Image: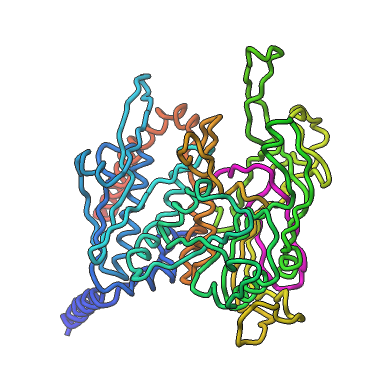
Amino acid sequence: MKYWRYIVVVASCLLLLAMSYVWRVRWDMTDDKHYSLSEASKTLLKQTDEPIKVTLLLNGDLNAGFQRLKKATEEISDEMKVFGDMRLKHEDLTFDSISSIGLQPIIIHERAQNGKTAQTTVYPYAIMEYKGKRAVVTLLKNTRGLSGEENLNASIEQLEFAFMEALHLLQQEETPRVAILEGHGEPDEAHTYDLMSALSRYFQVDRGSIVESRESRVESHILDGYKAILVVDPQEPFSEQERFVIDQYIMRGGAILWALNGVRFSEQVLQSDGFTPILSLELGLTEMLYRYGIRVNPALVQDIQCLPIPVNVSSDPQQPNLQPMPWTYAPLLLTSEGSPITRSLGQVMSTFVSPLDAVGGEDGIEKRILLATSTASRVTATPGEVNLNDMNPEMSDFKYQYIPVAVSMEGEFNSAFAHRMIPDGVETNEPIRKTSVKTRQVIIGSGSVLLNEVQKGQALPMGYDRYSGMQFSNRDFVANAVLWLTDSEGLISLREKNVALRLLNDKRAHEERLKVQLVSTISPVAILALIGGLVVIIRKRKYAK
């Protein structure tokens, strides 16, 4: 009978082992849930019916930071295998094969303790293949203004989103559509080229007017085929028919990004005369936006944290002397960590930005600030003027801080036409919808955030300042905003994942290096010797009796 207990234990272990191949149980004991996938990711992986092949290019002689990124990539791949047929392989491709894909290496310069500098070429990418289609996953997020450790940590935080975004694109059988509205003096295609390029990775981007002319009739459902529409820096008012079509599009669940300025000014006059008057810009959208819960103020913000512009400081017109001077009407906007749109993004470049006010606090609309000024700002109201001679303003005037200039809104919006008649010229067979289904809007107090400059006929990237040569986060901000507007699976929420950054104290680690080495070397030997001595003493006492 005494052997039955051993037989039961062995049989139980074999049964548990067999069950582990059928049911896999995991407990994530980390406080930041580092090893857990979101429900959106699990659902997306379970929808796959063919193997997902992932080739990791992050190989070679990597430093500790990139080793950590590689390990995190392997760990999230292991977690994805639980819910989908994920097959990860490491591969060292040749330079020519990588270049043919269009991937650019990152050159890392590191200084060793002996003072010598070492250079390493790293390819922080993974190539995902599914059903014959391929997508590139960028593993490293390089945000201006963050340290190397912070960038690596932000990259690890965004790994799940990066992989799920690529898989979502590969699973799409039909490319969703978004539209950029025209017909109100909006910027031409050359100045929105990079905007369309950034969105074309995810959407089919169309451009066009709601109505062909002021006299033509318009069908009220003309926008229904689009996941989102973008209103980018209009300069002429919207007709009542256009406002009705946009309003009812929102009521049926349509999403919209507004990039509007509250003032009218002329950059050409500013460049030629050195000053320009600023007046309120009437677009006919004030009432609509107020009903939705936001107001674009007819004013401009100024900020001490701003871009420089070249100014001729020479008194001799024959020998110009251009020097960079701070231009407070070009604020470098701060991004919020409280939204998946702006999390882990750097500053956003802008010019001539209007402040926003949230209205209707009891309307049930969830509003989040996306972009704001710094702690030293001021507001120039209309009517007024912008003057190039205003290069050295008094610091005491910049007494405002964190003025909101971009806001996201989510909820059930009230129609601006709830108690009005259907406008003439609109063809519809439905009554006016007075309240929307749950949907989303983003409003930005300047069209400049979405625009690119054109130099010698070539479009520059969004957020690139050609005077300083710096690249800001405009492109990522705009792409994230439109993804958030159109996200029905909840994938964009993965950008909110937080991984605690636990860094060593470099100074203390260097100063106490010898102490740590001695303790870590001698302690195990001392512990073993102590245990051995105790065993000998116990045995002597036991057998001495």
Q: Say which quarter of the image contains residue 329.
A: top right
Between 527 and 379, the one lying in front of the other is: 379
Left-right relation of 79 to 401: left
Q: Can residue 512 be seen in this view?
A: yes
What secondary structure do most residues of the magenta stretch adopt? loop
State the image coordinates of residue 89 (x, y, percent, origin top left). Answer: 22, 54
Where residue 511 sits: x, y (%)? 47, 26
What is the residue that sits farthest to the front in this orientation?
215
502 vs 285, nearest the viewer: 285
How many badges with numbers are in the image? Answer: 0
Give residue 23's quadrant in the image.
bottom left
Residue at figure coordinates x 30%, y 69% from the top left: 82
Q: Is 371 one of the magenta-colored residues?
A: yes
Whether 323 is drawn above or below 98: the answer is above
Q: Quadrant of the C terminus?
A: bottom left
| Rendered location of residue 221, percent (x, y) | 56, 78
Residue found at x 50% / y 55%: 479
Q: Is residue 425 above or below residue 180?
A: below
For the record, the magenta segment spans 344-373
Residue 415 lies, with reference to residue 508, above or below; the image says below
Tell me: 408 left or right of 23. right
Describe residue 448's horizontal placement relative to residue 96 as left or right: right
